[in-house]
C-alpha cells in the first residue's frame, strides 16, 4: 500500500511510527526527594510554609564541621534585631504576623498606613513618597524605598551573609553544589535530578517557631526509586508521639532575650 503514496507522505508516516515507539524521557533524569515539613506549636500541627531547605552532599559525619557551625552560630532573633534598630512595636508586630524577615515579603495594605493599626514607619514613608510622586496610591506601593535601609533589609542581609558563608563552607568540604528548595503552603517541597547517595538536609538558618530557634540537620539516603515521589521524607520540630514516619526531629534552642537599647 505504501508504494502508492507520495515519498514525502511515506517519510512522515515512518517518522510518526518511530516517535510512537520511542519511550518518552522521564521528567527528571535523576531520582526525587519529596520533603514534607510539619511543625507543632501548642496544640496545633501544621505544614511549615515558605521556608527554604538545603541539601548538602555527604553524610552528617562527613559534614560535621558544617553542622557544628550551623548549630553553634550566635542567634539574633528578628524581634531583637528590629528593636535594636529602633523599629516601632507596630512594625515588629507586622513582620511577625506576616512571618517576614524584611518589609519586602508581604504587600503593604491600606490598613497598614491608616487607622489604629497603622505602622508609623509606613505612614512616614508614604507621606514622603506622596510629595515626590503626587499620588498616595503610588506612594503606598513604593513606600519601601523611603524606609531607612536598616529597617528595609538589614536583618535579611545578615541572614543572607550567614547563609552564603555556610554554603561556601559546605561546597568546599563536599566538592558539590548545595541544592535548595522552598516549601509550599502545605510544607511540601521537591528536590529533583538527584544522584543516588547520602545527603545532609538542613535549613542552615534557624527558623523561629514560637520562643525557639529551630534547626534541622538530617541525614538522608537517596535511592533510585520510582516511588520516591510518593514517599515523603517527613521532618518535624518535635515528635512527642514517637511517630515512626518522622525521619528527623529538629534541634531547638531558646531565642535570646533582647537587650535593652
Image (spheres, grey):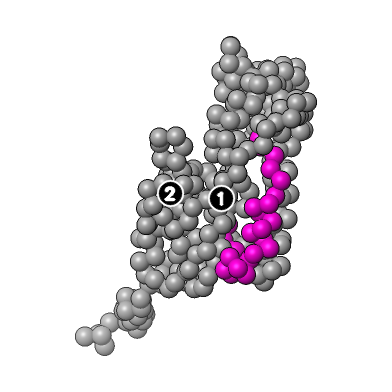
- Residue 20's place in the image compared with 64, above or below, is below
Q: Quadrant of residue 47?
A: top left
Asked whether 226 or 255 is in front, the reply is 255
Q: Is residue 180 visible?
A: no
- Residue 63's place in the image compared with 208, above or below, is below
Specify the segment rendered in magenta: 52-78
Task: Please provide percent x and percent y for residue 245.
Answer: 37, 56
Q: Is residue 241 left or right of residue 184?
A: left
Q: Badge 1, how many Cα within 10 Å: few under 14, some, many 20+? A: some
Q: Is residue 73 magenta?
A: yes
Asked whether 260 or 13 is in front, the reply is 260
Quadrant housing the N terminus: bottom left
Task: Please provide percent x and percent y for residue 15.
Answer: 36, 79
Q: Is residue 10 left or right of residue 127?
A: left
Asked whether 9 or 258 is in front, the reply is 258
Q: Quadrant of residue 115?
A: top right
Q: Is residue 27 magenta?
A: no
Task: Please provide percent x and percent y for residue 75.
Answer: 69, 43
The residue at the point 73 percent across, 55 percent down is: 165
Residue bearing the label numbered 2? 239
Residue bearing the label numbered 1? 251
- Residue 261's place in the image compared with 23, above or below, is above
Q: Is residue 8 visible?
A: yes
Earlier-in-chain disc, 1 versus 2:
2
| Marks 1/2: CA–CA distance | 12 Å
Amino acid at each position: 500500500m505504501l508504494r502508492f503514496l507520495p515519498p514525502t507522505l511515506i517519510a512522515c508516516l515512518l517518522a510518526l511510527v518511530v516517535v510512537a515507539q520511542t519511550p518518552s524521557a522521564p521528567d527528571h533524569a535523576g531520582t526525587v526527594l519529596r520533603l514534607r515539613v510539619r511543625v507543632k506549636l501548642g496544640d496545633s500541627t501544621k505544614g511549615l510554609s515558605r521556608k527554604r531547605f538545603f541539601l548538602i552532599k555527604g553524610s552528617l559525619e562527613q559534614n560535621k564541621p558544617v553542622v557544628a557551625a550551623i548549630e553553634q552560630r550566635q542567634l539574633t532573633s528578628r524581634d531583637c534585631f528590629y528593636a535594636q534598630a529602633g523599629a516601632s512595636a507596630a512594625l515588629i508586630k507586622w513582620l511577625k504576623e506576616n512571618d517576614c524577615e524584611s518589609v519586602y515579603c508581604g504587600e503593604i495594605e491600606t490598613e497598614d498606613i491608616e487607622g489604629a493599626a497603622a505602622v508609623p514607619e509606613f505612614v512616614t514613608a508614604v507621606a514622603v513618597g506622596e510629595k515626590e510622586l503626587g499620588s498616595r496610591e503610588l506612594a503606598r506601593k513604593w513606600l519601601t524605598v523611603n524606609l531607612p535601609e536598616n529597617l528595609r533589609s538589614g536583618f535579611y542581609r545578615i541572614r543572607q551573609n550567614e547563609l552564603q558563608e555556610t554554603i561556601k563552607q559546605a561546597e568546599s568540604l563536599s566538592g558539590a553544589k548545595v541544592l535548595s528548595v522552598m516549601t509550599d503552603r502545605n510544607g511540601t517541597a521537591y528536590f529533583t535530578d538527584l544522584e543516588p547517595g547520602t545527603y545532609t538536609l538542613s535549613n542552615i538558618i534557624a527558623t523561629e517557631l514560637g520562643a525557639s530557634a529551630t534547626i534541622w540537620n538530617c541525614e538522608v539516603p537517596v535511592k533510585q526509586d520510582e516511588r520516591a515521589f510518593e514517599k515523603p521524607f517527613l521532618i518535624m520540630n518535635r515528635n512527642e508521639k514517637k511517630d515512626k514516619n518522622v525521619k528527623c526531629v529538629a534541634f531547638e534552642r531558646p531565642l535570646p532575650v533582647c537587650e535593652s537599647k
